[in-house]
Amino acid sequence: MADEEAEEQHKQAYMEWLQDLGEAAISQMNPVRNVHTIESDGQVQTKSVTGMSGYTLIKADSIEVAMGIAQSCPYLQVGGTLEVAELIPMRGPQR
C-alpha cells in the first residue's frame, strides 16, 4: 500500500511539474517501449543503450536553461536520471 501511495504522489508531482512548464513543454510524456538497438555491423539488440524510458521535449533559450528545468524534474527524486540534449535543426529532402 505504501508503494502505491508513493507512486501516486510521484505521479502527481510529475504532472504538476509538467503543468508548471507551461508552453516550454512542447511534447510531454512520450514513453517508449520495445526498444531495439541496431549496431553498425547489423546486429540487433533488444535493449536500450541509454536506458531511456521516455522523453519530454522542452523549449529553452539555452542548454543551461534546459539543464535548470531538468534539474527541477521530480523523476530525479526517485533515483531517476535524465539526459538533456539540444536538437539540431536539419532540412529534410525537398518534396
Image (cartoon, helix red, strand yellow):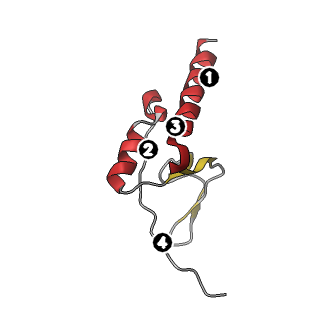
The amino acid beneath tag 4 is Pro
Q: Is residue 42 above or below residue 69?
A: below
The amino acid beneath tag 3 is Asp
Q: Earlier in the sequence, mark 3 or mark 2?
A: 3
Q: Please name whichever residue, 61 or 63, is drawn nearer the observer in this view of the structure.
A: 61
Is residue 93 found left or right of 67 in the rendered image?
Answer: right
Q: Earlier in the sequence, mark 1 or mark 4?
A: 1
The amino acid beneath tag 1 is Glu
Q: Earlier in the sequence, mark 2 or mark 1?
A: 1
Q: Which residue is mark 1?
A: 8
Q: Which residue is mark 2?
A: 82
- Find the distance from the CA under tag 1 to the CA under tag 4: 37 Å
Image coords of residue 86 (percent x, y): 42, 60
Image coords of residue 2 (percent x, y): 59, 12
In the rendering, which numbered label is found on residue 89? 4
Q: What quarter of the picture does the N terminus occupy?
A: top right
In the rendering, which numbered label is found on residue 20? 3
Image coords of residue 93 (percent x, y): 60, 85
- Find the distance from the CA under tag 2 to the CA under tag 1: 20 Å
Q: Is residue 26 above or below residue 14?
A: below
Circles 3 and 4: CB distance less than 8 Å?
no
